[in-house]
Image (cartoon, rainbow, N blue to C red):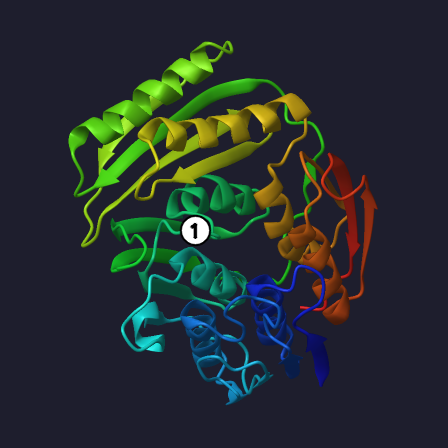
């Protein structure tokens, strides 16, 4: 049994998610200790617990410690991941409900189901646009298109938007499992020229002037700096109230995403500027991947025969921690050029055991 220190490095939920994914894929029993031990609310929260229950269901895993707030978890797969139709609700994991991130639950399940022969359909309810997680639109327009270049066939749609604290959103994903067990490697060192910059200014159950102000400020901010964005106003169906700006930058060889969420007392203009500033910093770095996609690709690239390589606008603690977790399970070699917090390059040479 592999034992993982859940407080290593960045010490967040990503350590748990990556460990669960690899345990399910490899049929490798594992125990993770000190889960999120340094967080304000340590242990398994609703989103994490939903991911545990969900992935246990698809590989018939034996669980110990799968309880709200638990710091330790034992996970023993008893079968290979099985394709099928699955439905999960983050609100069921916590008394009083939860707006836990649906995107993070879906990312935990995506690779195991992608290697399970047959078609799968996921329905996940909870928060679709919440802090500390990729919003649904990042999953759909950045993460999945990049994985498609590796041969992973999946799509996602949103039925309802879920905001903090109510949640209540719903997304679906269709995953077509592979008959073979290999993903293609990627060369994402040079991104090429910017082909299109587009985005959305979305609100739910709020006055229309908020989304209009976000759109106007985003367009003005970017046009002043020489860009020609296409921003669409979206009236998002949801049981709760919320607001967001999402930008997608499409280059010749890469796509990157940037987002900002509104909250009470935060001007609409500031919401727009946050997403715009993040894009500008990325664009000026001349790197291929944004900082979020860089850490999210560590695991799938490690499963490809390789070699793969990418540049990123920032080496983050999330990336370094994910590298460490993957190395606990797989015979894989990472070469990282650059310091934490700076632009960098990552090269991956892996041997897939799947």
Q: Quadrant of the N terminus?
A: bottom right
Q: Is residue 298 left or right of residue 102?
A: right
Q: What secondary structure is found at the residue carrying circle 1?
A: loop
Instruction: Pick the residue in front: 280 or 229.
Output: 280
Instruction: Report the residue at 59% width, 51% height from top.
Output: 296
Residue 187, image x, y percentages = 70, 37
Q: Is residue 330 left or right of residue 284?
A: right
Q: What number of labels is visible?
A: 1
Query: Observer-nearest residue: 316 or 55?
Result: 316
Q: Is residue 94 left or right of residue 345?
A: left
The reply to whether residue 270 is in sight is: yes
Residue 55 x, y percent position in the rendering? 48, 74
Q: Position of residue 210 (x, y in %)?
A: 24, 30
Q: Which residue is mark 1?
A: 131
**Residue 58 vertical placement versus 175 (above, below):** below
Which of the two residues, 269 or 90, is positioned nearer the viewer here?
Answer: 269
Q: Categorize mark 1 by other alpha carbons within 10 Å: few (<14), some (14-19), many (20+).
A: some
Q: Residue at x 32, y 30 (%)?
A: 268
Position of 52 relative to 159 (above/below): below
Name the image quarter holding the C terminus: bottom right
Q: Position of residue 345 (x, y in %)?
A: 77, 38
- Which residue shows up at 30% across the image and 43% down it? 264
Q: Quadrant of residue 72?
A: bottom right
- 231 w.r.t. 28: above or below: above
Q: Residue furthest front?
A: 265
The image quadrant of residue 77 is bottom right
Confirm whether residue 252 shows in the render: no
Name the residue located 49 percent from the left edge and 61 percent from the top edge.
110
């Amino acid at each position: 049994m592999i034992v993982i220190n859940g407080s290593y490095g960045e010490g967040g939920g990503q350590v748990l998610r990556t460990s669960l994914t690899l345990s399910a894929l490899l049929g490798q029993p594992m125990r993770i200790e000190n889960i999120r031990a340094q967080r304000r609310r340590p242990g398994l929260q609703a989103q994490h617990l939903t991911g545990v229950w969900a992935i246990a269901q698809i590989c018939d895993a034996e669980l110990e410690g799968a309880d709200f707030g638990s710091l330790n978890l034992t996970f023993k797969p008893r079968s290979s991941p099985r394709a099928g139709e699955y439905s999960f609700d983050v609100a069921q994991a916590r008394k009083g409900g939860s707006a836990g991130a649906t995107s993070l639950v879906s990312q935990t399940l995506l690779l195991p189901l992608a290697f399970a022969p047959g078609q799968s359909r996921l329905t996940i309810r909870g928060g679709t646009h919440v802090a500390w997680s990729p919003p649904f639109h990042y999953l759909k327009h950045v993460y999945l298109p990049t994985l498609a270049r590796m041969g992973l066939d999946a799509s996602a749609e949103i039925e309802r938007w879920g905001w903090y604290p109510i949640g209540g959103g719903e997304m679906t994903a269709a995953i077509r499992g592979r008959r073979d067990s290999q993903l293609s490697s990627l060369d994402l060192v040079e991104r090429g020229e910017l082909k299109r910059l587009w985005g959305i200014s979305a609100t739910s159950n709020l006055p229309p002037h908020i989304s209009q102000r976000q759109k106007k400020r985003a367009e003005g901010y970017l046009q002043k700096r020489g860009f020609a964005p296409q921003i669409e106003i979206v009236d998002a169906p949801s049981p709760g109230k919320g607001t967001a700006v999402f930008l997608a930058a499409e280059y010749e060889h890469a796509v990157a995403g940037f987002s900002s969420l509104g909250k009470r007392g935060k001007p609409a203009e500031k919401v727009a500027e946050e997403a715009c500033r993040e894009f500008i910093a990325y664009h000026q770095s001349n790197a291929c991947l944004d900082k979020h996609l860089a850490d999210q690709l560590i695991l799938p690239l490690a499963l490809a025969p390789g070699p793969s390589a990418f540049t990123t606008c920032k080496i983050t603690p999330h990336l370094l921690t994910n590298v460490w977790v993957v190395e606990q399970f797989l015979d894989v070699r990472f070469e990282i050029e650059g310091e934490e917090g700076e632009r960098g390059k990552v090269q991956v040479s892996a041997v897939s055991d799947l």
